[in-house]
Image (tube, rainbow, N blue to C red):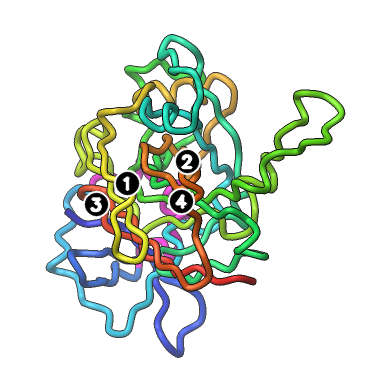
Amino acid sequence: MWSLVQYETPGLPGHRLGVLDKDTVRALPSDWPHDMLALLDSWHAWQDKLRSLEPVELDGVADARLVLPITHPRKVICAGANFYDHAAEMGTARPDPAESPFFFLKPPTTALTGPYDTVRVRDIEGAGLDWEIELAVVIADRCADLAVDEVDAHVAGYTVSNDLSARLRFPRPNAVLAPFAFDWLKHKAFDQSCPIGPGITPAWQVGDPGDLSLRLSVNGVVKQDSSTRDMVVDVRRLVSEVSHTLTLEPGDLILTGTPAGVGMPRKDFLHNGDVVEAEIEGLGRIINTLESA
């Protein structure tokens, strides 16, 4: 299984589009788009070439450094409380799968960061910084009002994400009204709050997104170990639900929720120097070191 990546090399400006085949970055032919969003903007036109791609026939790239697999997508949409065990550990009522899922947004140009980037968080020790491994869906084309059985035709692929959350910045105890009692901006939308990568694995290679293992560790200690089988609302329905509110566009990311094992229930938060590894079956692993900005 291979994925599409963006990479940089010493001495050359900007990034290039390539393929991550096992641990080797390989260059795509020069007549391919050099940017992931450009490829996604014409995703269906490239289908035949993508499906017939043989990574072993491509040249390896020496000293390649993987960067964000997609630069400046148009939207980053996140599902909340979408695993039963995570809802339970956070002390919420058991989610009803018949209800519409909850979504929020992250700013795509400042929240996203690369698969091996150092994540710098303002006053990290006072943030209550927590981890949330999530499967992220990458949209292939402009679409809206999708039925569940139409979703697959509009999904380009999947990637690994970590929805970092500043738990101690969430409550607003002096809010004037109940709807303003929680600060979603400070909690979820801060700079570098969403590492993703290492690449985008095309959907046809993944098969069933509802049966993938997820694992996250902090400093080598496993914190989350679960499967997308345990979602309240499955991937296809999440995409369908979003599409009835927002028109989806090429490159849009939809994060699908996190399982149990986050730090909040035990006040087990991230600190300066901690290393977080997040891995999803078949999609690869991202590794980020935390620093106080």
Which residue does the numbered mark 3 point to in the structure image? 49
Per the model, the C-alpha gap separating discs 4 and 3 is 37 Å
Per the model, the C-alpha gap separating discs 2 and 3 is 47 Å
**Residue furthest to the right:** 176
Magenta stretch, residue numbers? 31-49
Q: Is residue 198 visible?
A: no
Select label 1 or label 2 by which is in front: 2
The answer to whether the residues at label 1 and label 2 have Cβ atoms under 8 Å apart is no
Point out the tag, 2 or 3, that comes first from the N-terminus.
3
10 Å crowding of disc 3: few (<14), some (14-19), many (20+):
few
Query: At numbered mark 3, what does the secondary structure look like: helix, strand or loop?
Result: helix
Image coords of residue 95 (percent x, y): 44, 18
Image coords of residue 24 (percent x, y): 21, 72
Image coords of residue 27 (percent x, y): 28, 72
Q: Nearer the viewer, residue 166 or 211?
A: 166
Point out the tag, 1 or 3, that comes first from the N-terminus.
3
Which residue does the numbered mark 4 point to in the structure image? 131
Query: At numbered mark 1, what does the secondary structure look like: helix, strand or loop?
Result: strand
Query: At numbered mark 4, what does the secondary structure look like: helix, strand or loop?
Result: loop
Kind of residue sitting beneath label 4 = Trp
The answer to whether the residues at label 4 and label 1 have Cβ atoms under 8 Å apart is yes
Which residue does the numbered mark 2 point to in the structure image? 265
